[in-house]
């Protein structure tokens, strides 16, 4: 059956209307070596009912896992109100506000997002968000390179490996050297950081809590940066920790950036994510993307505007500070709704997460897991046990995801697991995990 309903005469008429003689003419710009020489082995079209059954069968293959996995994406409870508000048509279908004066609701949400990020980081200004934490870090580094002649960047090796990979690509394309500082004891080594910086260094970059869950001595690193007269960038992949730990601004950090997925956004299948970037006021005109500001209109009513528009869609490409960033409007809106509901309870939730991770660590140590680092941690920590890969694979078969195998990202960390607990992991679930592990180890 021809589901399209297009006859040969219809096809000929359409081709004539666009001025070509055949379907092949439409693809004349594609070089011959790149053309497909045989039909694709694709199934035929399906009806709505058939598609629903097919997709339903695929969905039934999903397994509900008990997860203690972190490593840059964190599973938190999302209140029903966040889903409800973000699915309203005026938000769900909205896109970049190219005509901001008619996008007051969207601009209001972005303004509130910026305000909340500033309050959490203790910095002066935040932009309208970026794709994800990795590109946010890369954009932060580009801010320090913009308008100068610096030739290298000093970056802690305790930064998330995926973030480092993205940054390497950015720096390679710009002819900038990445100087990686080898961590010691799970945290950035201060003397090594000092030695990595010279007169050609544009910034010192460190993550806290870092990839291993360890809390860095950001005050000491900020002092090193000030002594060497370079800006310091703090990367944050689990922003919930800002409810419990000192703010980057309190240490004199120049730029804070990272991932805000934890605020009202699901982990999904790897996304979507929500990058954020905040900075001291002096860096405002180097920031990528947009800044939403609040003012009043000619009638004296509160109004929101795009105060700075440094994205290439808004201004000439050669003057743009970034050509990739977007406002991630829907994800930012979800973060605003989540933080509005959480309010000042963020500190209590952060403390609960830490207590649950401490409990998980303690219970695993009781059955033979060894702590790898002594540094204070938040939300996740590294443990070692012989045969970790085999244990993790057996657990997965039984419906448990115990952490992230680190030897895949750090070859020297054999049998090490990065484990994480959030409010979604109850003490009873931790007890059940330990019971299952006792039958495996």
Image (tube, rainbow, N blue to C red):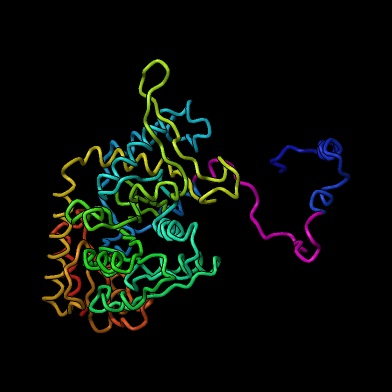
Residue reaching furthest to the top: 299
Residue 430 seen in render: yes
Residue reaching furthest to the right: 21
Q: Position of residue 238 (x, y in %)?
A: 28, 57
Tell me the quarter of the picture where residue 80 sits.
Answer: top left
Frontmost residue, 379 versus 417: 379
Frontmost residue, 76 versus 175: 175
Residue at 42% from the left image edge and 65% from the top image edge: 202
Give the left or right position of residue 290, taking residue 81 as reference: right
Frontmost residue, 113 versus 65: 113
User: What is the quadrant of the N terminus in the image?
Assistant: top right
Residue 111 in the image: above or below residue 43 = above
Q: Position of residue 287 (x, y in %)?
A: 43, 49
Residue at 19% from the left image edge and 53% from the top image edge: 423
Magenta stretch: dominant SS?
A: loop
Residue at 37% from the left image edge and 73% from the top image edge: 197
Q: Position of residue 22 (x, y in %)?
A: 86, 47
Q: Which residues are magenta?
A: 29-52
Q: Position of residue 246 (x, y in %)?
A: 19, 55
Residue 123 in the image: above or below residue 107 = below
User: What is the quadrant of the C terminus in the image?
Assistant: bottom left
């Amino acid at each position: 059956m021809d589901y399209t309903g297009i006859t040969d005469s219809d096809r000929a008429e359409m081709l004539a209307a666009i001025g070509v003689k055949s379907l092949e003419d439409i693809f004349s710009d594609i070089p011959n070596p790149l053309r497909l020489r045989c039909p694709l082995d694709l199934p035929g079209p399906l009806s709505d009912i058939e598609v629903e059954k097919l997709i339903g069968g695929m969905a039934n293959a999903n397994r509900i896992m008990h997860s203690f996995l972190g490593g840059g994406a964190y599973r938190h409870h999302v209140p029903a109100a966040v889903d409800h508000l973000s699915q309203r048509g005026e938000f769900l279908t909205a896109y970049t506000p190219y005509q901001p004066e008619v996008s007051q609701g969207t601009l209001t949400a972005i303004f509130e997002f910026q305000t909340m990020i500033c309050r959490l980081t203790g910095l002066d200004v935040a932009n309208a968000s970026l794709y994800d934490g990795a590109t946010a870090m890369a954009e932060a580094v580009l801010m320090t390179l913009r308008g100068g002649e610096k030739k290298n960047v000093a970056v802690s090796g305790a930064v998330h490996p995926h973030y480092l990979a993205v940054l390497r690509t950015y720096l390679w394309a710009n002819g900038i050297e990445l100087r990686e500082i080898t961590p010691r004891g799970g945290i950035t080594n201060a003397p090594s950081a000092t030695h990595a910086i010279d007169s050609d260094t544009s910034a010192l970059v460190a993550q806290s809590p870092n990839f291993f869950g360890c809390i860095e001595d950001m005050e000491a690193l900020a002092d090193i940066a000030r002594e060497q007269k370079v800006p310091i960038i703090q990367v944050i992949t689990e922003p919930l920790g800002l409810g419990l730990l000192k703010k980057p601004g309190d240490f004199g950090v120049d730029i804070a950036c990272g991932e805000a997925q934890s605020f009202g956004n699901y982990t999904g299948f790897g996304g979507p994510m929500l990058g954020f970037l905040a900075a001291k006021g002096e860096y405002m005109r180097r920031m990528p993307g947009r800044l939403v500001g609040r003012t009043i209109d000619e009638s004296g009513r509160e109004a929101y505007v795009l105060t700075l528009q440094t994205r290439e869609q808004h201004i000439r490409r050669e003057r743009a500070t970034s050509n990739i960033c977007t406002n991630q409007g829907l994800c930012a809106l979800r973060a605003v709704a989540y933080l509005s509901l959480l309010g000042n309870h963020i500190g209590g939730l952060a403390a609960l997460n830490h207590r649950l991770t401490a409990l998980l660590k303690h219970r695993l140590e009781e059955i033979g897991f060894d702590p790898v680092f002594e540094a204070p941690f938040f939300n996740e920590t590294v443990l070692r046990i012989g045969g970790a890969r085999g244990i993790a694979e057996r657990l997965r078969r039984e419906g448990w995801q115990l952490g992230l195998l680190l030897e895949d990202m750090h070859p020297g960390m054999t049998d090490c697991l990065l484990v994480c607990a959030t409010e979604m992991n109850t003490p009873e679930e931790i007890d059940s995990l330990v019971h299952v592990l006792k039958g495996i180890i």
